[in-house]
Image (cartoon, rainbow, N blue to C red):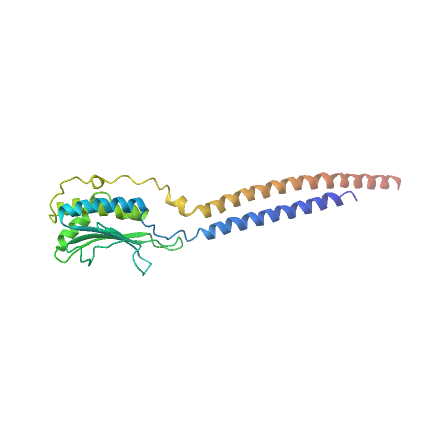
Amino acid sequence: MSTGKPAAKNKAAAWAVWLTIGLVVAGCVAAGVLNNDGDTTVAAPAADERADSVAILKRTSAEQGLCYGWELVDYYDYGDPLNVGSNLGDGVAVEENPACPRWVQVTANIGYVSESSESNDFARIQVTGSPDIDSADLWQVERGLERLGLTEDVFVDDPGWAVTRAAVMLPLLAVEAGLAPPADTPVPAAASPSPLPDAGSDYLRDRWGWLLATVGLVLLAALFVTVGVVQRRRQRRVVVPAQRAGAGAAGRTREKA
C-alpha cells in the first residue's frame, strides 16, 4: 500500500522529463531548419561607401578624361543590378551613357548558394570598357584588382565594400595600362585596400543552428541519464524493504508449522 504514492510521483516526474525533452528538441530542430539554407542575400554598398566612391571618381575622371563606374549583380536575380554608380553619381551607370564616351567599369557578379547545396558561394569579376579600349588593356586592369588584394573571396565576404573599392582603384590601374594620364592629385583611397573586418569562422556562422541542436541533445541526454539514476535509486529504496518484510513473515510461518 505504501508504494502507490512513490509510483505516482515517479510517473509524474517521467512525464515532466519527456515533455521537457520534447520541447527542447523541437526548439533545437526548428533552429537548425531555419538556419539550414542560410542568408543568400547579396548586400549592396553602404550609403557612405557609395558617396565616398562617387566623390573620388568624379575628381579623377575630370582630370583624366575617362569615366569610371561600378555594377553589383546578384547572379540568381535576373532583374536589374543591385547597385550601380560612377563619377556621374550614385545610381548612374557609365555604360552606354552619352555623358561618357570613354569609360571603364567593374562588374561584380555574386552568387550565394543555400547551405544544403553542394556548390560554393562565388564571385565573377569583370572589367569592361567603351569600344575604343582594347580588351587586352581591360584584362590588365582586371588582373590588377586581384593583385591589389581584391580577390574573389573578398567579393564573396563583403560584395558592397569590395565593388566600390575596386571602382576607386580603376583610375590607378588605368594609368598602369596606358589608358589615361596620371591624375594631378593623388587618390588616397586607391593607394592600398584597407583590411576587411574579421568575419569569423564560416563554419560557425553557417551552422550555428545545428551546433545548438547538438549541444541541446547532449545536455538532454545527460539530464535523462541523471533522472533515470535517481528514479532507479528511489525504486530500490521502496521495493527492497518490502521484500525483506515478506521474507520474514514466511520464515515465521514455517517455524510455526
| Whole-percent x, y for residue 83 in the image | 29, 53
Residue 205 visible within the image = yes
| Whole-percent x, y for residue 145 in the image | 21, 46
Residue 146 visible within the image = no
- Compare residues 12 and 249 and report the one nearer the observer: 12
Q: What count of labels does the image hold?
A: 0
Quadrant showing the N terminus: top right
Q: Is residue 19 above or below residue 95?
A: above
- Residue ID at (70%, 40%): 236
Quadrant showing the C terminus: top right
| Whole-percent x, y for residue 72 in the image | 28, 53
Outermost residue on the right side: it is 256
- Compare residues 56 and 189 and report the one nearer the observer: 56
- Compare residues 188 and 215 and report the one nearer the observer: 188
Q: Is residue 15 left or right of residue 173?
A: right
Q: Is residue 144 left or right of residue 74?
A: left
| Whole-percent x, y for residue 55 in the image | 23, 45
- Residue ID at (17%, 51%): 67
